[in-house]
Amino acid sequence: MHIVQMGMEHDVLKENSRIAHSNYRLLKDHGVRCIELMGSIGSGKTALIIKLAEQLRAKGVRSCAIAGDVAGEDDYRRMRESGLDAVNCNTGRECHLDAEMVRKVLENVNLDLYGVIFIENVGNLVCPADFPLGADYRVVVVSTTEGDDMVRKHHDIFIHSDVAVLNKIDIADAVDVDPDVIAEDYRKLTGGLKEIYRCSVKTEHGLGEVLSALNL
Ligand SMILES: Nc1nc2c(ncn2[C@@H]2O[C@H](COP(=O)(O)OP(=O)(O)O)[C@@H](O)[C@H]2O)c(=O)[nH]1
Ligand SMILES: [Mg+2]
């Protein structure tokens, strides 16, 4: 008899998927759309969430954000100071959020109050890819300051995300990065089917297109 040994990793990912699906159902039952942002430390995830939430507020849509970080309350505080409702979620030593952490946070959020929930994952371009959380859209945010090789080096996270955003277009020249190179790498990776959304949270350039890409 041939015995297939199921590794620990398989079980963990399967269980994560199951909980992610139940998070998704819970959010749908309350009519909440959920957007997860992944990306390096400093790519502009917090800044983008704050700005998108402001634009949604102007349209009468109320949002809440889950600030995922290894430690500290910095992003959570920035979100709150901007007027955005937020929940802090420290992972301790984990380099990514998982569906169970999000499930526990959602248990303590009055979902009937919100049209949109943003989830900021821990700054990391590798680990979050394997752990869906139950969002409608997984978004990867990279910035020009990270160099022009992000898509080539980290294709997994681009493949595991629905929408890709290239932020800090305003300082591309200053850091000698050609956004066209990143855009072309992404186009190739996605078989010519998808474009990376270029924006600057600072100047607000391209944010309307990002909102539309997220169906918001
Ligand atoms: N010039 C410029 N700076 C930005 C832009 N977006 C974010 N930043 C800055 O980049 C830094 C990191 O942003 P943050 O939102 O904390 O990144 P996170 O670690 O991905 O959450 C902050 O100092 C932001 O003000 C942008 O579009 N242009
Ligand atoms: Mg942040």
Image (cartoon, helix red, strand yellow):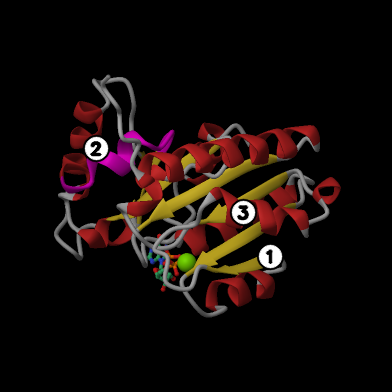
Task: Please say whether residue 193 is visible from this viewpoint.
Answer: yes
- Gap between marks 2 and 3 measured at Cα: 32 Å
Instruction: Point out the image quarter for the N terminus.
Output: top left
Nearer to us in this view, 56 or 161: 161
Counting from the top left corner in percent of width and height, residue 210 is at 49, 40
Q: Which residue bears the numbered disc 1?
A: 86
Instruction: Point out the image quarter for the C terminus.
Output: top right
SS state under label 1? strand
Residue at 68% x, 72% y is 80
Tell me which numbered mark, 1 or 3, is placed earlier along the sequence: 1
Residue at 36% x, 45% y is 9
Tell me which numbered mark, 1 or 2, is placed earlier along the sequence: 1
Tell me which numbered mark, 2 or 3, is placed earlier along the sequence: 3
- Gap between marks 1 and 3 measured at Cα: 13 Å
Q: Is residue 158 left or right of residue 72?
A: left
Question: For residue 83, which quarter of the picture?
Answer: bottom right
Residue at 34% x, 26% y is 194
Q: Which residues are magenta?
A: 153-163
Q: Which residue bears the numbered disc 3?
A: 102
Question: For residue 54, which quarter of the picture?
Answer: bottom right
Specify the amino acid type for callout 3: Val
Judge the density around disc 3: few (<14), some (14-19), many (≥20) Cα neighbours within 10 Å. Answer: some
Residue 73 within the magenta-colored segment of the rendering? no
Q: Is residue 27 left or right of residue 210?
A: right
Above/below status of 168 relative to 26: below
Mark 2–mark 3 CB contact (< 8 Å): no
- Residue 169: numbered disc: none
Give the label, 1 or 2, closer to the camera.
Answer: 1
- Gap between marks 1 and 2 measured at Cα: 32 Å
Specify the amino acid type for callout 2: Ala
Give the label, 1 or 3, closer to the camera.
Answer: 3
